[in-house]
Image: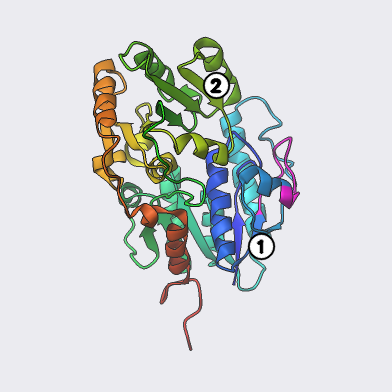
C-alpha cells in the first residue's frame, strides 16, 4: 500500500513547525506500518530542500520516504504586499496544478492537510483523506462540496470541528484528537528537582501574542518567583529573542526554538505545563493541542486558559483552569497545580500516543464499505 502525502506548508520551516511535526509524525507512523509514502510539497522556502536526510534531521524522524517536491513560481513569498491574499491565491493555484498532475496515477490514495487539495481531488472522485485542524467559512463550503464524493474522508481533530462542519456521513468521518511521541516524551523522577513551570509552543498566532508576556508578568509578581523556574520554548525567533532580552534571569529561561528531544529533557524534570491563548474561535472550539499530550506523557500537571476545546481533553483532573486577563486566577490555578504535582498520574496514557492514534488513522483509511480500498467483488 502507498499513500501520497500532499501539503502546501513550508518545508523545512519554523514558521509552520507545528504543522511540520504533524506531517512528519504521520509519515513516521505510516512507514512504521510498512506503508510507502510519497511526500509532495512546494519548494517555496528559501532553505527548501529535497534532501531526505536533511528533512529527517530537522523533524527528528528515522524512517525513509520519497520526496516529489514541486517548483514554486507563484506570488506568495515573492510579492511583499497583500501577503494573505497572495498566500490564498498561490495555495489554490498550486493545489489545482498538483491535483491534476497526480490524479492520473492508478490506485491513488492521498492524505492531506490542504482543504484545496481535498476539494480538487474530491471533485475528480479520487481517494483522499483530509485532516482538518481549523475552520473558516470558505473551508466549510469546500468540505461540504468535497464530501459529496463517496471516496472522500475527513479526520476532525475534535468534535466541535465535526459539529461546525455539519457533517452527516458517519462512515467517512471520524474524530481523532492529537497525541504525543511516546519514544520522545516520558516521565522521570521529579522529587529532587527544582520546581519547573513550562510554556511550550508558538508564542504568537497570526502575529498576536498568545499571552506569554502576561504569564511572565504574573510569575514575576508571585510568591513562586524565588523558588521556581519558568521556561519558555517556542518562536518566532525575533519574538523569543525580545522576550529573552527583557526577562532572562536565573529564574526565567527563554529558549526559543529547540529540538523536541532537547525539549523532552526539560519536560521530563518539570512539574507544571502552561497552555494559554488569546480569545478566538480557533482557541475556543477548534484545537487539540499537541503540547497537552506532551505534558501529560512527561508526567506533568497542566494549567490552561478556560476554553471549550480544552475541556474536551482527556484526564480533566490533570488540568487547572484560569482566565488570561486575571492575575489572581492564574496564580490560583498554578498553586492548585503545584499542590497536586506529586499525586499519582494517569497510568494508561499510552492510549494517547501518536502510535496509537495512527493505528486508528490507518484503520479509518482502510475501512469499508465506503473506505478507500475497493470492495471485495
Q: Residues within 10 Å of mark 1 (few under 14, many from 20)?
A: some
Distance of mark 2 from mark 1, alpha carbons?
Answer: 40 Å
Residue 43 lies within the magenta run: yes
Q: Residue at x 70, y 37 (%)?
A: 45
Residue 233 vs residue 342: left or right?
Answer: right
Q: Nearer the viewer, mark 2 or mark 1?
A: 2
Residue 113 vs residue 348: left or right?
Answer: right
The reply to whether dot 2 and dot 1 touch (C-beta < 8 Å) is no
**Corner quadrant of residue 224:** top left
Q: Secondary structure at mark 1?
A: helix
Relative vertical location of residue 140 with respect to residue 64 in this rendering, above or below? above
Q: Position of residue 139 (x, y in %)?
A: 45, 46
Relative vertical location of residue 250 with respect to residue 170 in this rendering, above or below? above
Residue 59 vs residue 225: left or right?
Answer: right
Q: Secondary structure at mark 2?
A: helix
Q: Nearer the viewer, residue 29 or 376?
A: 29
Q: Nearer the viewer, residue 264 or 156?
A: 264
Q: Position of residue 233 (x, y in %)?
A: 51, 29
Q: Position of residue 293 (x, y in %)?
A: 40, 45
Q: Position of residue 227 (x, y in %)?
A: 37, 18
Residue picked out by circle 2 = 240
Q: Where is the N terminus found, in terms of image quarters?
A: bottom right
Which of the labelled discs sits on residue 102, or is there none? 1
Highlighted magenta segment, given as a residue range: 40-53
Q: Nearer the viewer, residue 189 or 369?
A: 189
Prevailing secondary structure class for the magenta stretch in the rendered image = loop
Q: Residue at x 62, y 45 (%)?
A: 59
Amino acid at each position: 500500500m502507498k499513500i501520497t502525502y500532499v501539503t502546501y506548508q513550508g518545508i523545512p520551516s519554523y514558521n509552520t513547525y507545528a504543522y511540520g511535526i504533524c506531517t512528519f509524525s504521520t509519515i513516521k507512523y505510516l512507514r512504521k506500518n510498512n506503508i510507502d509514502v510519497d511526500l509532495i510539497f512546494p519548494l517555496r522556502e528559501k532553505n527548501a530542500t529535497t534532501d531526505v536526510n536533511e528533512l529527517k534531521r530537522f523533524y527528528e524522524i528515522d524512517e525513509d520516504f520519497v520526496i516529489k517536491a514541486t517548483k514554486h513560481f507563484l506570488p506568495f513569498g515573492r510579492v511583499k504586499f497583500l501577503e494573505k491574499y497572495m498566500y490564498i491565491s498561490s495555495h489554490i493555484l498550486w493545489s489545482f496544478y498538483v491535483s491534476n498532475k497526480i490524479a492520473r496515477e492508478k490506485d491513488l490514495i492521498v492524505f492531506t492537510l490542504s482543504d484545496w487539495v481535498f476539494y480538487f481531488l474530491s471533485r475528480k472522485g479520487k481517494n483522499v483523506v483530509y485532516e482538518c485542524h481549523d475552520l473558516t467559512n470558505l473551508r466549510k463550503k469546500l468540505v461540504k462540496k468535497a464530501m459529496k464524493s463517496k471516496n472522500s474522508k475527513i479526520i476532525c481533530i475534535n468534535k466541535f470541528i465535526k459539529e461546525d462542519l455539519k457533517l452527516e456521513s458517519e462512515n467517512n468521518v471520524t474524530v481523532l484528537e492529537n497525541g504525543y511521541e511516546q519514544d520522545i516524551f516520558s516521565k522521570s523522577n521529579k522529587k529532587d528537582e527544582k520546581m519547573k513551570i513550562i510554556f511550550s509552543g508558538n508564542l504568537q498566532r497570526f502575529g498576536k501574542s498568545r499571552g506569554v508576556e502576561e504569564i511572565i508578568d504574573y510569575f514575576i509578581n508571585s510568591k513562586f518567583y524565588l523558588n521556581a523556574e519558568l521556561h519558555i520554548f517556542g518562536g518566532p525567533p525575533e519574538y523569543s529573542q525580545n522576550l529573552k532580552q527583557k526577562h532572562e534571569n536565573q529564574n526565567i529561561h527563554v529558549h526559543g526554538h529547540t529540538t523536541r528531544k532537547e525539549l523532552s529533557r526539560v519536560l521530563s524534570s518539570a512539574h507544571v505545563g502552561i497552555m494559554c491563548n488569546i480569545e478566538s474561535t480557533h482557541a475556543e472550539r477548534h484545537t487539540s493541542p499537541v503540547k497537552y499530550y506532551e505534558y501529560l506523557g512527561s508526567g506533568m500537571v497542566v494549567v490552561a486558559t478556560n476554553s471549550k476545546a480544552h475541556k474536551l481533553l482527556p484526564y480533566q483532573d490533570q488540568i487547572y483552569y484560569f482566565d488570561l486577563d486575571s492575575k489572581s486566577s492564574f496564580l490560583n490555578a498554578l498553586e492548585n497545580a503545584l499542590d497536586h504535582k506529586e499525586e499519582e498520574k494517569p497510568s494508561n496514557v499510552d492510549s494517547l500516543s501518536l502510535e496509537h492514534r495512527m493505528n486508528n488513522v490507518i484503520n479509518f483509511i482502510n475501512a469499508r464499505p465506503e473506505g478507500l480500498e475497493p470492495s471485495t467483488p
